[in-house]
Image (cartoon, helix red, strand yellow):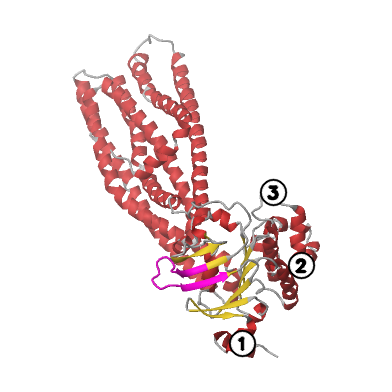
C-alpha cells in the first residue's frame, strides 16, 4: 500500500528519534504479547481446575494474572511516555518551521492568507497532525500486533473457527474505505470554516474600538454565529460518517461470534473441543474485537490529520523571500537610483509604477506627494526589497539591490510608518528592537532625541515599563515617538518616513519634527507626506500621479510652476481653518 506523501514526510521527521521509537515499539510488542496470555490461562483452568484436583498450584493463577497486568502496565506506560516525548518534540519542530517560514515569506503572502487562518494552522491544525500520529501510529502498531498475536493463538487453538472469524477483517476494511473519502472532504471544509471563525475572533479582538463606535456588535455576532453554525454542521456530518463505522463493525462482529458459537457447539457434540477450549477461543475472539474496533476508528483522525497536514506543510513549503546576494562590507553612503523602474503587484495586470527615473544623492531629503493611489508607498516599499522590482532596477551606491542580500540591504534602512507597530515588551526593548546586544546609553539618547524622556520619567518603571499589546498603554503620540526613537537608535544611512508625524498633536509634532530634522541630517531620507506643510524644507519634492512622476522640484519651484503640486497645496490650505 502506497503511503500518502504527508505521512512519508512525517515519518522522515521521526528519524532522529529512532532509538526512542524502538523503545516504544518494544513496549507495544510486550503489550500485544500479553493479550493472548489471559485466554491461554483460562483453558487449563476450566478444563482441569474445575473438574477435579488440578495438576498445578492454585497460587499460580493469581500470580500469573497479576503478573500479566503488571507487565502490561509497565510496557503501556513506557510506550505512552516515550511517544508523548517524541510527539511533543515533533510538535515544537513543526511549529518552529511554520513560524520561521512566517518570518521569511514576502509581504504579499498575507494578501491571500488571512492572519486568522495562519494562526489556526499554527495552533490547531498542527495539533491534529500530531494527534494523527498518537491516535493512529501507536494504536495501529500496537493493535495490529495484538490482532496478529490473538489470531496466531486462535489458529493454534481451533483453525476452523478462526477461518470464520477472518471473514470479519475484509468487511471492516471495506467499511473504512467507503467512509474515508467522505470524511476527508468534510474535514477539508471543516478546517476552512474553522480558519474563518478564528479570523472573525482575531478581527473582533483587534477592532474593538471600531466595533463599539460604529455599533457593529450585531454584525459581528451574526458573522460569528453563521460560521459557528456552519462549523457545527460539518462536525455533525463528520461524526455521523465516523459513528456509523462502529455499529457496522459491531454488527459484523456479532454475526461472526454467533456463527462461531454454533460451529463450536457442533464440534463439542462431536468431542472436537472442550469447554475450556471453547471459552478460551471466545475470550480471545472477543478480546480481538477491541483492537479491531480501534483500527477501524483510526480513519477519523487519519482524515483530519491528512487534511491538517496539507495546511501545515503548505505553510512550511511557501516560497520565502530570496536569500541570495552579497553582504555589504561597510555602511552604505546612501545614494539611491531608480532606473526605468516599473512595478506590478502579484496577480495584477495594471502597473502600480511605470517609467520611474530618479537619483537621490547621499544625505538628500526627497519627499513624495500626490493623490492617494499615486504610488508613493509602493515606491518606497521597493527600496527595502519588500517586493521584487518587475521592470528596471533600484541601485544603492551604484549597485543593483537585486544583487545585495536582503538582510544586508535592510541593515542600511530605518523606517517609521504611519501605522505604528510596537511589541508587548518594555520601552527599552522596543527602542533597541532587533539589536541582540542593546546599548543602554544609545537607548537613552534615542529616547531623548525623540522627546520621550519626559514620558519615560512618568512611567512606573521607566525604560523597563511594559507597554502592552501594540503599545496600548501609551497615547497615539507617544507610540509614534517611540517608533521614531527606534529609528534613531538604528542609526541607518537611509531613512524612510511614511507620515511619521501624523499621530502627533501640534506641540508633540514640533518637538518630534526638531528631532527628525536632527536625525535626517547626513542621511538619505525618503518622506511620504499628505500634509504638505511638513515637507516644505525638503531638498526636493517628487509628485506622483497614476504611478508616474509628473513633477520634480523644490517647494518654491513647484509653487511657481502652478502645476499639480501647486493645486494640491492651495487646495489643502484652503481647507485648513485660519
Q: Quadrant of residue 429?
A: bottom right
**Quadrant that contains the N terminus:** top left
Q: CA distance from mark 1 to mark 2?
A: 33 Å
The residue at which mark 1 appears reads as 559
**Numbered range of the magenta stretch:** 338-359
In the image, residue 536 lies in the stretch drawn in magenta: no
In-image side of 256 versus 201 (left or right): left
Which badge, 1 or 2, comes first in the chain's sequence? 2
**Mark 2 and mark 1 in contact (Cβ < 8 Å)?**
no
- Residue toward you, 573 or 356: 356
The percent coordinates of residue 74 (x first, y second) are 50, 26
The residue at which mark 2 appears reads as 451
Residue sitting at x 33%, y 51%: 183
Query: Mark 3, residues whose alpha carbon is within 10 Å: few (<14), some, or many (≥20)?
Result: few
In-image side of 370 versus 190 (left or right): right
In-image side of 494 versus 428 (left or right): left
Q: Secondary structure at mark 2?
A: loop
In the image, residue 348 lies in the stretch drawn in magenta: yes
Residue sitting at x 36%, y 42%: 297
Q: CA distance from mark 1 to mark 3?
A: 48 Å
54 shown above or below 248:
above
Query: Mark 1, residues whose alpha carbon is within 10 Å: few (<14), some, or many (≥20)?
Result: some
Residue sitting at x 69%, y 49%: 437
349 shown above or below 150:
below
Identify the mark at residue 520; answer none if there is no mark. Answer: none
| Circle nearer the viewer, 1 or 3 | 1
The residue at which mark 3 appears reads as 437
Amino acid at each position: 500500500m502506497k503511503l500518502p506523501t504527508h505521512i512519508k514526510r512525517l515519518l522522515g521527521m521521526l528519524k532522529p528519534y529512532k532509538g526512542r521509537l524502538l523503545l516504544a515499539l518494544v513496549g507495544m510488542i510486550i503489550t500485544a504479547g500479553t493479550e493472548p496470555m489471559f485466554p491461554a490461562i483460562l483453558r487449563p483452568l476450566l478444563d482441569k481446575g474445575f473438574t477435579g484436583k488440578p495438576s498445578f498450584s492454585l497460587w499460580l493463577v493469581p500470580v500469573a494474572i497479576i503478573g500479566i497486568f503488571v507487565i502490561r502496565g509497565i510496557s503501556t506506560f513506557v510506550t505512552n511516555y516515550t511517544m508523548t516525548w517524541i510527539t511533543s518534540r515533533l510538535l515544537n519542530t513543526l511549529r518552529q518551521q511554520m513560524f520561521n517560514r512566517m518570518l521569511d515569506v514576502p509581504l504579499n503572502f498575507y494578501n491571500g492568507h488571512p492572519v486568522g487562518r495562519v494562526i489556526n494552522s499554527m495552533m490547531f491544525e498542527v495539533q491534529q497532525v500530531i494527534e494523527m500520529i498518537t491516535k493512529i501510529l501507536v494504536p495501529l502498531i500496537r493493535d495490529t500486533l495484538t490482532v496478529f498475536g490473538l489470531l496466531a493463538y486462535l489458529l493454534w487453538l481451533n483453525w476452523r473457527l478462526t477461518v470464520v472469524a477472518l471473514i470479519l477483517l475484509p468487511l471492516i476494511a471495506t467499511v473504512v474505505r467507503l467512509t474515508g473519502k467522505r470524511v476527508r472532504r468534510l474535514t477539508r471544509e471543516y478546517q476552512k470554516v474553522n480558519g474563518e471563525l478564528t479570523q472573525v475572533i482575531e478581527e473582533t479582538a483587534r477592532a474593538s474600538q471600531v466595533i463599539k463606535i460604529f455599533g457593529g456588535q450585531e454584525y459581528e455576532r451574526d458573522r460569528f454565529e453563521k460560521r459557528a453554525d456552519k462549523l457545527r454542521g460539518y462536525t455533525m456530518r463528520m461524526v455521523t460518517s465516523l459513528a456509523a463505522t462502529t455499529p457496522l463493525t459491531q454488527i459484523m462482529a456479532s454475526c461472526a461470534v454467533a456463527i462461531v458459537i454454533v460451529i463450536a457447539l457442533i464440534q463439542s457434540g462431536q468431542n472436537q473441543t472442550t469447554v475450556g477450549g471453547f471459552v478460551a477461543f471466545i475470550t480471545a475472539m472477543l478480546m480481538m474485537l477491541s483492537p479491531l474496533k480501534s483500527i477501524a476508528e483510526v480513519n477519523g483522525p487519519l482524515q483530519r490529520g491528512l487534511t491538517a497536514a496539507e495546511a501545515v506543510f503548505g505553510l512550511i513549503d511557501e516560497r520565502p523571500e530570496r536569500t541570495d546576494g552579497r553582504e555589504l562590507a561597510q555602511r552604505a553612503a546612501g545614494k539611491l537610483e531608480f532606473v526605468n523602474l516599473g512595478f506590478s503587484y502579484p496577480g495584477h495586470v495594471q502597473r502600480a509604477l511605470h517609467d520611474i527615473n530618479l537619483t537621490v544623492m547621499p544625505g538628500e531629503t526627497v519627499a513624495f506627494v500626490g493623490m492617494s493611489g499615486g504610488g508613493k508607498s509602493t515606491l518606497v516599499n521597493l527600496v527595502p526589497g519588500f517586493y521584487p522590482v518587475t521592470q528596471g532596477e533600484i541601485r544603492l551606491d551604484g549597485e543593483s539591490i537585486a544583487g545585495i542580500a536582503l538582510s544586508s540591504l535592510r541593515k542600511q534602512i530605518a523606517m517609521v510608518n504611519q501605522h505604528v507597530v510596537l511589541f508587548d515588551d518594555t520601552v527599552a526593548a522596543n527602542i533597541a528592537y532587533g539589536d541582540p546586544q542593546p546599548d543602554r546609553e544609545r537607548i537613552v539618547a534615542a529616547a531623548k532625541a525623540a522627546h520621550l524622556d519626559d514620558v519615560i520619567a512618568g512611567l512606573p518603571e521607566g525604560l523597563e515599563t511594559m507597554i502592552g499589546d501594540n503599545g496600548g498603554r501609551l497615547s497615539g503620540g507617544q507610540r509614534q515617538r517611540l517608533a521614531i526613537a527606534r529609528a534613531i537608535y538604528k542609526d541607518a544611512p537611509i531613512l524612510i518616513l511614511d507620515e511619521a508625524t501624523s499621530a502627533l498633536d501640534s506641540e508633540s509634532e514640533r518637538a518630534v519634527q526638531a528631532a527628525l530634522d536632527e536625525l535626517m541630517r547626513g542621511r538619505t531620507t525618503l518622506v511620504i507626506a499628505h500634509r504638505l506643510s511638513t515637507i516644505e524644507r525638503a531638498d526636493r519634492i517628487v509628485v506622483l500621479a497614476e504611478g508616474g512622476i509628473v513633477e520634480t522640484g523644490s517647494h518654491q519651484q513647484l509653487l511657481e510652476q502652478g502645476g499639480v503640486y501647486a493645486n494640491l497645496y492651495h487646495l489643502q490650505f484652503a481647507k485648513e481653518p485660519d
